[in-house]
Image (spheres, grey):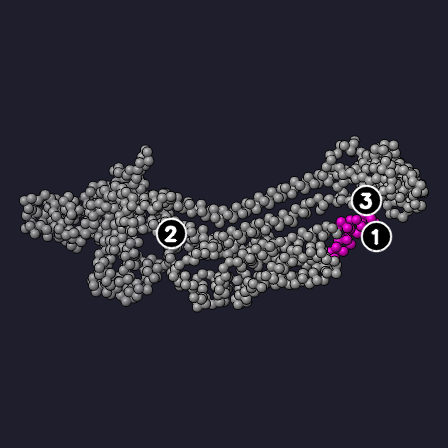
Amino acid sequence: MEKDTGEGAKRRLHKGSPGGGEGRKKKAGDADTRVPTVRTPEEKHRRQCVCPKIPPRVRLVCCRVLDNRVVEVTLMLLTFYALFGDDVRRLATSRTADPVFDAFTSVALLAFGLEIVLSAIGKKDYLFHLFFYLDVVSLLSLVLDLSSVDEAMHVWAEEGSSATEGDVSQAALAGKAGSKVARMLRLIRLVRLIRVAKLYKNIGFSSAPQQDDEFREFDSFLEPEAIDLDDLKEAPAASKRGETSENAAEEFQSEVGKKLTEKTTRKIVFVVLALTLIIPVLSEETIVTKFASEKSGLELVAEYATAARRGERQESWLRVYTHATLFYMNYHRRGGIGDSGGNSSHLAFFQLALPLYQTTMLDGRIYQDIPCTGFASCANSLVLPPEAAARLYLPEAVSKGALIVDDLDSVDDLRLSEREVYTAYFCNAASADSAVGGSPKATDCDLDKVTQIRAVFDRRSASKIEAGLSILRTFIVCFLLIVGAVLVTRDENKLVLVPIERMMGKMKEIQNNPLAAANMSDDAPLDGTSKKLHDAHRRALEEEEASSPFRVLQAIFSDKGKGGAESMETAMLEKTIIKIGGLLALGFGEAGAEIIAKNMKNADGGLNAMLDGKKLQAVFGFCDIRNFTDATEILKEKVMVFVNQIAEIVHGTVDQYSGCANKNIGDAFLLVWKFPEVEREGGVKEQLMDTATTNRLADMALVSFVKIIAEINKSQVLAEYRDIPELIERLGTGWKVKMGFGLHVGWAIEGAIGSEYKIDASYLSPNVNMASRLEAATKQYGVYILISNELYDIMSPQAQLNCRQIDRATVKGSQVPLGLYTVDLDPGRLSVVRHPLGTGGGAQNKSRLRQQRTLQKQKLWSSRTSISALFETDPDIVTMREHLTKEFLTTFRRGFCHYQAGEWHRAREIFVKTQFMLGVEDVPSSVLLSFMAGHGFVAPADWMGFRELVEK
């Protein structure tokens, strides 16, 4: 593959090569600094319109018409007319005023119809949603207020229920049918109450602070990032200064508040409408057929009885009285001529005014001996149970009354609520003053001659129906109230409580483990592929719902709406908490975890970042980027990208091997491996310092530095810096990114360093400085890694075999001699690994990689995993060490023993051999030869086996 020229590499770097600044793929959670996208009006409205083919200006005009103050007031007045107009017409006017009210009703129909059309065109989330269907139903119900339609409905009902002319019972049924129609029409009109909810909503919107038309337009149709900057007016002066209006909190209505209000209104409207429509239907009047002739018929019988006692033609009146009595009982008895099958009460007891006249009883049938004419009901004889019919001929039937049913022993067997008593009065005395041929009344009768007659109706069926309807109404009311409460509570839980609980869970998680906050955001968003699948699935569900016959119920109970959950303030607040927690974890690091945790647990107290330090044992690593000054001068502002690309490798590898990054000091990094803590009795925590733990942690610190060296030399991103002409000119043709590493172990004080103005969570100890001194010494010895003997001593024996002691010396600032060890590596043997572009970067990928990294870290702590075995199994480490020979290592160790013993002439002979034994210069051999040469290859008299490093 042909190598790129230097100019091409530099151009890619400055444009944003893989991993570079501008070209770097935007990660989830990065701050969005994009300039608002400028779209054409067609593009803007296509994203928001229900009907994308409607021109945006048409939609805007529709919204402006609906928002016009005159239109709003007009619709409000017409709403009041729709609610009360028909009732006022019937209450206060006569039929001559109907045309005037019909005209107002027609105007209301036209206005509300236009409102529906304009709302469907101009308003988002209206067409085929709940309020659309309710508006259509209320509009159709308004048609019933037209007098011509009202009369036609009543005529239709009467014609449908009437039979032959002159049949009194059927005419009564027709009248009842007309009453039912009127009752149902009144129920349908109740749907218009929904306009009150809309009226309240509109008034609430109108009373809010009004924005300029331009802002109203963009607020209705555009996304925040799709604003035409040229169309916006100059911001208010307070906004320019960054000040906040005193009434800003009152003027601002959150998305959560809007959504909760909208959803609660839906549920309340549904419950109220259900109660308003269902409860009247379940009333006794709707189910039970009730006669109107119980009282009037009995009074007619009493009138005929009075005429029979006081009239001149008594025989004729007695026949009329008898016929009226038999017809009354025959009409109201169970199974009588007036029983249409839906009667809820039946005549059970009747008190005769006078004995029956000229009748015959045969097997319960009672006939009049002289047939009556002129009535369709004359052909029907009274049919009663034989015993009941016989009781009508007893004297007690006149004085006390008689049961006409056989399922009761006495009227007292009925509860008071199960009987209905009707009474009438007749004059039981003859009068010579009665008018000839008239029907004398009992009103001018002496009080002592006035006699009462009774008719008792058995209404047990009606009582049972009432009880059943009452139970059903109670169940329905309870059900609707419970459903309404559950739905409202569900909305509150979903929009408010659950997000708050989730946020509290995140807060507690951060309190318990502040470092976990850095990884929380990986689980939140979807990556590109998953988001596409999610959106496709959502669109399929919406299409399925749109074709469903239950769209109205779905409109009531569905969670669809503007913005979605992602645009809610609770969701934004949760993400903000996660981001702030992640930034705290990244900023403070593991050293500041306790500062974060204690301050978050102390919610009632103030901020206290200056906590007492804590002493601990840890492995400290220090690494430095070589030739950083030259790179800074050449790369200029791109040097930040350069450092961050190296930091990504360093921090990631250290984390993989249970370490953590503490400080980023320009061209250097301080890294820490803390010994794990265990909780003893009484909640006291102490570090685990057994041999197995110390061996493993020391091995991991060493391996992580070796792996960093390998990754830096394999990185495709960092390899591109090798081709930048300015760097080649300054640093030479073979220049590549190099780093030096120092490793030491010891105690340190962990805590906050600084003041109330600025703190750093870090470590203070001579041991931290010692790691820095060791890293600086790598330049003198020409090696990549220097390890102190204290760390070497706690490594596993297998790891120690891969280290070579190259000196024993005291570093500047310390009088204690240290054995200096290194791991011999040749990174030049590794090849750059080319990664395909566009891999990784998604949140799902990050989450999956984080899980894999966690499992890998757990695996490294398993007793079955040998860290030191990586020197034999890891391909990169094996490649970097394949130039070493056992002869070289053995020879150098022998020469170093002579060097420490002061036998420098013998050491000189050996180091001269090892200096170029591997084909390239062994710098440690050269350094020791140079040091001994300064003393003429004769050890000083006070030689103690170590020397002093004068360079820092």
Q: How many labels does the image show?
A: 3
Q: Tell which circle, 3 or 1, labels the residue nearer the N-terminal end.
A: 1
Q: What residue type is labelled 3?
A: Ser
Q: Is residue 393 left or right of residue 268?
A: right
Mostly what secondary structure, the magenta segment? helix
Q: Is residue 551 left or right of residue 734?
A: right
Is label 3 in a helix, a strand or a loop? helix
Contact between labelled residues 2 and 3, with CB atoms less than 8 Å apart: no
Q: Is 685 included in the stretch rendered in magenta?
A: no
Q: Residues within 10 Å of mark 2 (few under 14, many from 20)?
A: some
How far apart, in angstroms, are the residues tagged by discs 3 and 2? 83 Å
| Residue where numbered disc 1 is placed | 165
Towards the viewer: 436 or 206: 436
Task: Determine the residue positioned at 32% across, 62% down.
Answer: 17
- Residue 339 image position (x, y, % from top left): 79, 43
What amino acid is found at the position of numbered circle 1 in the picture?
Glu
Mark 2: which amino acid?
Answer: Lys
Which residues are drawn in magenta? Answer: 151-177
Q: Assess disc 1: are there few (<14), some (14-19) or many (≥20) residues with their C-alpha within 10 Å of its C-alpha.
A: few
Q: Earlier in the sequence, mark 1 or mark 2?
A: 1
- Spatial separation of the CA atoms under disc 3 and disc 1: 21 Å
Looking at the image, which residue is at 85% across and 42% down? 443
Number of residues whose C-alpha sits closer than 10 Å to that of mark 3, classed few (under 14), some (14–19) or many (20 or more): few
Q: Name the residue under label 2.
A: 579
Q: Does the magenta stretch include residue 160?
A: yes
Left or right of 364 in this view: 604 = left
* Residue 623 at least partly seen: yes
Element type at mark 1: loop
